[in-house]
Image (tube, coloured by chain):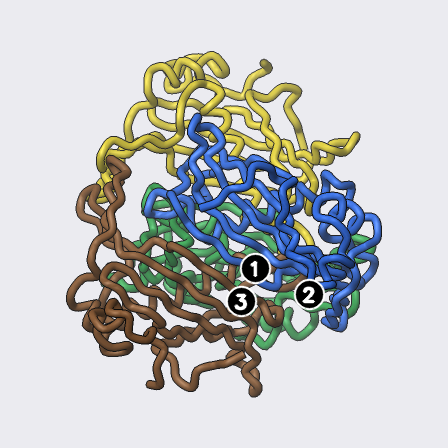
Chain colours: A brown, B yellow, C green, D blue
Amino acid sequence: MEIPAHFHFSHRRLVEFADTDLAGIMHFANFFRFVESAEHAFFRSLGYRVHTATGTEHEGWPRIEVSCKYLKPARFEQTLETCLRIEELRTSSLRYSFWLFVADEPTRSLVATGSCSIIHVQLDTGTHAIRKSPIPEGLRQCFESFVGPVSEQLQGKPPAIRTI
Amino acid sequence: MEIPAHFHFSHRRLVEFADTDLAGIMHFANFFRFVESAEHAFFRSLGYRVHTATGTEHEGWPRIEVSCKYLKPARFEQTLETCLRIEELRTSSLRYSFWLFVADEPTRSLVATGSCSIIHVQLDTGTHAIRKSPIPEGLRQCFESFVGPVSEQLQGKPPAIRTI
Amino acid sequence: MEIPAHFHFSHRRLVEFADTDLAGIMHFANFFRFVESAEHAFFRSLGYRVHTATGTEHEGWPRIEVSCKYLKPARFEQTLETCLRIEELRTSSLRYSFWLFVADEPTRSLVATGSCSIIHVQLDTGTHAIRKSPIPEGLRQCFESFVGPVSEQLQGKPPAIRTI
Amino acid sequence: MEIPAHFHFSHRRLVEFADTDLAGIMHFANFFRFVESAEHAFFRSLGYRVHTATGTEHEGWPRIEVSCKYLKPARFEQTLETCLRIEELRTSSLRYSFWLFVADEPTRSLVATGSCSIIHVQLDTGTHAIRKSPIPEGLRQCFESFVGPVSEQLQGKPPAIRTI
């Protein structure tokens, strides 16, 4: 298990009672809620909102694909630190990896890791039409400051995982 | 604890793993999800949907007030039967009581009971404007077939709890 | 709507994307998760945990009864401040009221208010036996510092709502 | 996208209001709840429970790894049919693929697909010890009736995806 030395963003959240299940640990689907919280906090830290609406025209970032490996249980009242790193940046989409650590342990155990591919879309909640849409200019520039220009990545250069 | 002999609707749903918490039982907030499932199935049984949208204009039934008494734990893989009875019908709103029984026990233990007051609204998801709106004619007639005319109830007649 | 000038505890939490529903606002059942988060943070602030386990013997605080009035919608990325006040303290149980305000508005709109009655129990997750149990001495003393001795309240004195 | 002609199990569940988010569609994390519901129904169909407890000794099936591709939104009041196929069977673990279709459409649109690797464990909720444990004999035989003997698969034979 390779863990990068640096991340692009990190975010803490407490495991609440309602996040657990009868096995006494956080329910596996709720890890994705923690990852989503971190992603949305990442967007806010860059001055952007992950979801906006004008009339029926919404802009948002639905998921294309997600995955998660579960390494250790997460328990009630542990604080988890979710760390994100953008791996691939494209015109309308990006893929980031995530790592969830137990924040309040000296050893900072890794409890889960995985990735999310998300796409920028315009969706009309009236007609249900959804179409992909280029990442807004300013936000793209923020992401490029982490992983380099989209153009390079689209030209078959090595993927965005780089030493930062 | 008085339990009516007859209900206006009943609906079954299984307690899933994700509904439980580390105390080994269904999380208290999830009982309201079961009640909502039953309410929406009630609407469907009458030929109506609890939420519709045309452009940014939504019609729906937000909650005004809810309450619940918890009598016994509900456990993983129990089937709960949620029984509803309309207690009060008004021009734009109604109040119903609910009872949740363990469906797959001969004794049909009562695990929880309470009530929900809900209101028919038109809400504009563009402007966020919400205004109450009379219950659609056909739906109101359905409800009146259970509890009698709205007009009687508005004139200070005894509330809609009646032998049915 | 009377709002007390002082509360016994307050706690902030962000409305996350996963807390909302297709009406564009926080789902009504999730308000109870926010209240529970505040309650558990209240316990932690007093040096206690709301749930502990030794083998199959758990100590916890299940709900006896809850209620909530919904006054305004709560929206994505609003921070809600949940304020608690103990209203009644008994040997094994207590009732508190809660108020949820929009924390990041100058006007601090009240979005919901209600109450929870909770009981201290010992539950055996092996046998499923549950029995009520006196509130642990130290914790009871903490609560009494807010609302006065249990003994007074049990003797039919006026309920614990008092100017503080 | 290759979809198998036959599945080992299928299970239907309605998209409830509480499953949706403000984008007007089912929240991405909730797809995993639907998959879990199907998995547990699969176990029940074979005469087994996915989670049992004797005192603090629990037997269960935590997730090792999950993934999901999202192809189309799932909407309120759609019935989804979740179809499962075991792909790999090992001594203590298995991996299955899943496909979620809109059940109440003639075209049966595929909305999502992915896989879950799960492991049979004994966990002690007192000590928090977790150790992997061979799949119980009878249950293993059920799974082998779908995909052939574990022994073959462990000897480097082609993976369990086969025409059935």
Tell me where residue C138 appears, x and y as whole percent. 66, 75
Tell me where residue B37 appears, x and y as whole percent. 51, 35
Q: As rendered, which of A40 and A8 lies closer to the eye?
A: A8
The amino acid at mark 3 is: Val
| Number of other residues with Cα within 10 Å of mark 3, as a class: few under 14, some 14 to 19, many 20 or more | many
| Number of other residues with Cα within 10 Å of mark 2, as a class: few under 14, some 14 to 19, many 20 or more | many
Per the image, the residue denoted by label 1 is A28
Task: Please name which of the two marks, 2 or 3, marks the residue nearer to the observer.
Answer: 3
Residue in view at x 38 percent, y 37 percent: B62
Q: Is residue C67 above or below residue A24?
A: above
Per the image, the residue denoted by label 3 is A15
Task: Please name which of the two marks, 2 or 1, marks the residue nearer to the observer.
Answer: 1
Q: Give residue B152's quadrant in the image.
A: top left
How far apart marks 1 and 3 lie (CA) works out to: 12 Å
Residue in view at x 28 percent, y 64 percent: C104
Horizontal side of B152 relative to A155 (left or right) equals right
Per the image, the residue denoted by label 2 is C135
Residue in view at x 56 percent, y 37 percent: D5
How far apart marks 2 and 1 lie (CA) works out to: 33 Å
Q: As rendered, which of B55 and C10 lies closer to the eye?
A: B55
How far apart marks 2 and 3 lie (CA) works out to: 25 Å
The amino acid at mark 2 is: Ile
Tell me where residue C85 appears, x and y as whole percent. 48, 61
Q: As rendered, which of D155 and A91 lies closer to the eye?
A: D155
Q: Are marks 1 and 3 on the same chain?
A: yes
State whether residue B20 appears in this view.
no
Q: Give residue A147's quadrant in the image.
A: bottom left
